[in-house]
Image (cartoon, rainbow, N blue to C red):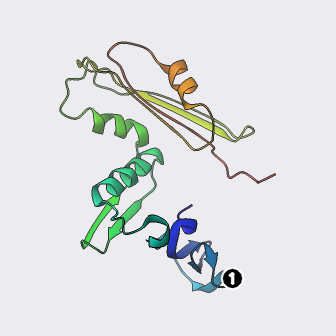
Amino acid sequence: MVNALSEWLDADVYREGKHYHLECVRGRSKETVKLVGTTNKQGTKIAFKQDEEIFGDTELEYDTLLKRIREMAYLNAGLRITFRDDRVNKKEVFKFEDGIKAFVKHLNEGKETLHKDVIYLGREDTDAMLSCEVAMQYNDGYTENVLVFANRAGDFAVRRNLLRVGGRDFMIVYYGSCISQSSD
């Protein structure tokens, strides 16, 4: 999606000892993926500029992007995500080994929790290509805070309501595929 909405996008992929590079302009690759050489790195680096023909002169908000990227790091336990914004010369690195359990702790900072440990349930079904994680921690607040994250289309409200436990609860749900899917 980022590629389709960008004036330009550069992608570097470091995988299985090789470095690949792809340059795109307004959603189309300039040429095929290039093998740059060998590397010891692993991961993906994406750099882009939003397309002003689509968005106009919209300024991307650093704090909004930072919050969303931090959430992505929580939702992908153990994955290191580096966010660098050259406009303001800032760089943040996120990596949360405990994933959504750490997210619940983060969101409950400064609140009086009713139990020390975050309650966590997780299940992965590789045949169905699904995974589901639930983490919750009760606090003494009066406001319910239920967050649902999904990377498949569907009815988020149904999932949220099925998992609601009422009252003064705090729950995070992450529901998504655990294996890449084919487009058949």
Q: Residue at x 44, y 50 (%)?
A: 72
Q: Nearer the viewer, residue 41 or 176?
A: 176
Question: Image quadrant of residue 139?
Answer: top left
Q: Is residue 91 above or below residue 142?
A: below
Q: Is residue 179 above or below residue 172?
A: below
- The mark total stands at 1
Left or right of residue 143, residue 136 in this image: right
Instruction: State whether residue 32 appears in this view.
Output: yes
Quick check: 115 left or right of 99? Answer: left
Q: Which residue is mark 1?
A: 32
Q: Position of residue 100 (x, y in %)?
A: 42, 38
Horizontal arrangement in the rendering, residue 59 relative to residue 21 (left or right): left
Q: What residue appears at the point 48 percent right and 72 percent down from the top-left corner?
A: 53
Quadrant location of the N terminus in the rendered image: bottom right
- Label 1 sits on a secondary structure element that is loop
User: Dot 1 surroundings within 10 Å: few (below 14), some, or many (20 or more)?
Assistant: few
Q: Residue furthest right?
A: 184
Q: Position of residue 146 (x, y in %)?
A: 40, 27
